[in-house]
């Protein structure tokens, strides 16, 4: 019964294996077993044989148990092949589900390491398998990836084509994706016309090619798949239009400035100085020194009311007689506070006019003001500037910082975004900009009309939109329309068909992640295997 239990536990009902014993040696678990099949198939010709040539022990690493490494000592037999024409004179029996030729691991552990290598590659995978108490180096994991068989080739009907950088700005490759299944089909080592055209010619059956507006991929598609329908990706078309809008906004950036943002702030310099001076002239209401002065003033006057003399009060409170005399002559403690710790010359006084000017200009950050004053010769500390800025904030609590002028990027974004995605402030500022600049107003109208074509997939109306743009005096948009005319059929198809190249862009981002994971040092063959097999 014990042997039956061990066979179920270790080998998951693998036929042809019998467990002899299990031994624990420190951090190592050794499972001793032997093969029990009567017949074995020759690895060369497939003929069955039962003639035993010899026996020996194979050591196979297996998945860890209780964080202990496991080694299977499997006693196997070498058989003689009875076929005279077979090149294999002898062969070793293989246990299905447990062993494979030249393997030093169990078949189950081999599959686990292959999948782990595809997900994490070398260094990260090696750290994980070390945690799992399985011996495997990063080089071993990379060899496992390279030894995996090529994925089964298939030709998609709808093919997405895009480039990705092997070394940004220098070396580029091509990724091919099945748009219908959203799975990668192949990776090509470059983006040359001949390479892509050759692949298309070797894989006939592509009916639709989704691509960007690259002339290289357009030419490759015409050469390799002359009957395929070319579709320009909508995202790339819209991006080209957004770039065109940005050029137009740059040409009229002088009109982006809002005339009301330069109005002065609520307080003049004299009013600001007055309010701050009044605030500074008031006695300090809190703090260590004001609290101590008020306590001693109250104590001195209590003793005076009891008829105690100044000399006795000084001895009782531990104060000098002149100090007791000042407290006795002051009716209230505020008389001692005003004039001693306020309205004294400050190291900040020569720089206050500049502070008032910068405050009116909208700079209200104490740290930034301190750095500007230090550059102008201020030798004091930051805390002095910070206290003065707090007084300014108390004196002018309702002053708002001035709004920035809309930038080129802001206006471009407002024009190319859906109007419902703009808040009320953005909508009003865009309306003001368009009112000041008729060229941008007409550009925005054309952009909205084109957005309707894209959203409603009304590619048949593209010709009318092109005529409207050409009839208008907008050089940047005219240049965009001229570019559309060079690939008009693909653009019309892109604005009409339901597919998009979103799957291609997604795999492009995944490739970037895999490259970072491998520190950018993986060869193309390794990257290709990970992209195609991990999917």
Image: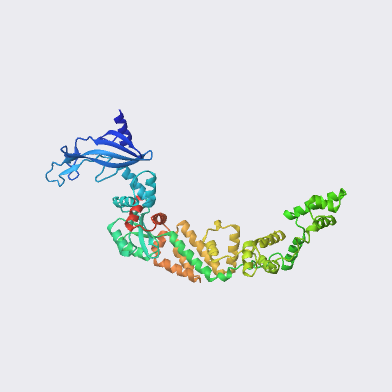
Image quadrant occupied by the N terminus: top left
Question: How has the structure been colored for display?
Answer: rainbow
Q: Residue furthest left?
A: 84
Image x and y of residue 154, in percent: 30, 52
Q: How many marks?
A: 0
Is residue 336 visible in the rendered image? The answer is: yes
In the rendered structure, the answer to whether residue 316 lies left or right of residue 182 reads: right
In the rendered structure, the answer to whether residue 477 lies left or right of residue 255 reads: left
- In this rendering, the answer to whether 476 lies above or below 309 is below
Q: Quadrant of residue 199?
A: bottom left
Q: Residue furthest right?
A: 307
- In this rendering, the answer to whether 100 lies above or below 318 is above
In the rendered structure, the answer to whether residue 279 lies left or right of residue 518 reads: right
Q: Quadrant of residue 75?
A: top left
Residue at 38 percent across and 55 percent down: it is 518
In the rendered structure, the answer to whether residue 31 lies left or right of residue 370 reads: left
Image x and y of residue 363, in percent: 64, 64
Is residue 182 visible in the rendered image? The answer is: no
The front one of 516 and 309 is: 309
Image x and y of residue 175, in percent: 36, 58
The front one of 394 and 493 is: 394
The front one of 521 and 45 is: 521
Image x and y of residue 210, in percent: 38, 58
- In this rendering, the answer to whether 180 lies above or below 428 is above
């Amino acid at each position: 019964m014990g042997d039956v239990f061990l066979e179920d536990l270790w080998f998951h009902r693998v036929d042809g294996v019998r467990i002899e014993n299990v031994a624990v040696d420190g951090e190592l678990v050794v499972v001793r077993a032997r093969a029990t099949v009567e017949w074995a198939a020759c690895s060369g010709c497939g003929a069955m044989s039962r003639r035993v040539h010899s026996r020996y022990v194979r050591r196979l690493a297996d998945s860890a148990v209780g964080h202990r490494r496991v080694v299977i000592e499997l006693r196997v037999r070498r058989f003689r092949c009875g076929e005279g024409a077979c090149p294999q004179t002898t062969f070793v029996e293989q246990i299905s589900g447990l062993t494979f030729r030249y393997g030093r691991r169990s078949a189950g552990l081999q599959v686990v390491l292959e999948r782990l290598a595809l997900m994490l590659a070398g260094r990260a995978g090696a750290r994980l398998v070390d945690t799992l108490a399985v011996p495997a180096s990063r080089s071993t994991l990379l060899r496992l990836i390279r030894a995996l068989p090529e994925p089964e080739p298939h030709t998609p009907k709808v093919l997405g084509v895009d480039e990705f950088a092997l070394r940004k700005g220098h070396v580029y490759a091509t990724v091919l994706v099945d748009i219908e299944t959203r799975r990668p089909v192949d990776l090509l080592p470059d983006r040359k016309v001949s390479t892509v055209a050759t692949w298309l010619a070797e894989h006939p059956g592509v009916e639709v090619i989704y691509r960007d507006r690259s002339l290289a991929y357009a030419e490759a598609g015409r050469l390799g798949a002359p009957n395929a329908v070319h579709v320009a990706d909508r995202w790339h078309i819209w991006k080209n239009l957004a770039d065109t809008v940005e050029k137009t906004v740059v040409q009229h950036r002088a009109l982006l400035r809002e005339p009301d943002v330069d109005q002065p702030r609520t307080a003049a310099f004299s009013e600001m100085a007055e309010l701050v001076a009044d605030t500074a002239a008031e006695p300090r209401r809190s703090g260590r020194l004001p609290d101590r002065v008020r306590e001693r003033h109250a104590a001195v006057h209590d003793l005076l009311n009891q008829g105690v003399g100044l000399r006795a009060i000084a001895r009782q409170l531990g104060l000098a007689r002149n100090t007791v005399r000042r407290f006795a002559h002051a009716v209230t403690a505020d008389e001692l506070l005003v004039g001693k710790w306020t309205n004294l010359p400050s190291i900040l006084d020569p720089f206050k006019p500049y502070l008032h000017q910068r405050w009116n200009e909208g700079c209200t950050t104490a740290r930034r003001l301190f750095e500007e004053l230090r550059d102008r010769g201020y030798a004091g500390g930051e805390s002095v500037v910070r206290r003065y800025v707090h007084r300014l904030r108390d004196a002018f609590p309702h002053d708002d910082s001035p709004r920035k002028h809309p930038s080129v990027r802001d206006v471009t974004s407002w024009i190319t975004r859906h109007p419902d995605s703009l808040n009320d402030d953005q909508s009003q500022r865009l309306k003001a900009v368009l009112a000041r600049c008729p060229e941008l107003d007409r550009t925005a109208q054309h952009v909205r009309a084109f957005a309707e074509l894209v959203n409603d997939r009304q590619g048949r109306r593209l010709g009318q939109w092109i005529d409207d743009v050409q009839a208008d005096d907008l050089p940047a948009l005219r240049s965009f329309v001229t570019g559309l005319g060079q690939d008009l059929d693909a653009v019309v198809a892109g604005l009409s068909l339901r597919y998009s190249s979103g799957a291609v862009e997604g795999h492009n981002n995944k490739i970037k992640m895999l490259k970072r994971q491998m520190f950018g040092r993986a060869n193309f063959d390794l990257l290709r295997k990970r992209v195609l097999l991990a999917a």
